[in-house]
Image (tube, grey):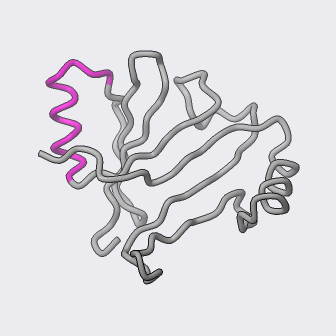
Amino acid sequence: MKRVTGIGGVFFKAQDPKAMHAWYKRHLGIDVQDWGGAAFTWADAEGKPSGGTTIWSVGPADGDQFAPSNAPFMINYRVADLRALVALLKAEGCQVLDKFDDGEYGKFAWVIDPEGNKVELWEPPPGQ
């Protein structure tokens, strides 16, 4: 079974998110949106969209969006079959959080790595 198929997003905390948004927009050209991040559309070698996006987002340092982890970041990994992967991770003894979201943006589950970092697993909706 294929586990991770790509990176769906990179999320990190900042003391001053608005200043970070401005810096990344000015110096690296990232088109930071009002919601605090940017969506990078995947493309093939010719530059044609290839059915995926990677989200980049900066949030407030005092937020609890990565709890129970204390890390200032979280990586979101794309997966092909979330329910099967979660079952496999549990069988392998991994610390899988007892939460599963299934909505408009796809299916989400979370696992804690050996150093306590929260890892987000995402199965995109069909066609993405």
- Say if 62 sits above or below 39 in the image: above
The kind of secondary structure the magenta stretch mainly shows is helix
The number of callouts visible is 0
Q: What percent of the width, then of the height, locates residue 66?
A: 56, 33
Question: Which quarter of the rendered picture does the N terminus lie within?
Answer: top left
Residue sitting at x 29%, y 46% = 4
Q: Does the magenta stretch include residue 39?
A: no
Residue sitting at x 78%, y 55% = 24
Horizontal side of 67 relative to 118 (left or right) equals: right
In the displayed image of the protein, which residue is found farthest to the front? 45
Q: What percent of the width, then of the height, locates residue 87?
A: 17, 35
Q: In which image quadrant can residue 114 be found?
A: top left
Residue sitting at x 36%, y 53% = 6
Question: Which quarter of the rendered picture does the C terminus lie within?
Answer: bottom left
- Say if 23 sits above or below 51 in the image: above
Q: Nearer the viewer, residue 53 or 67?
A: 53
Q: What percent of the width, then of the height, locates residue 98?
A: 34, 31
Horizontal side of 117 relative to 4 (left or right) equals: right
Q: Nearer the viewer, residue 7 or 81?
A: 7
Task: Tell me the magenta residue range.
Answer: 81-95
Q: Which of 65 and 11 is in front in this view?
A: 11
- Say if 69 sits above or below 102 in the image: above
Horizontal side of 115 relative to 59 (left or right) equals: left
Q: Does the magenta stretch include residue 89?
A: yes
Q: What percent of the width, then of the height, locates residue 39?
A: 58, 65
Residue sitting at x 59%, y 37% = 65
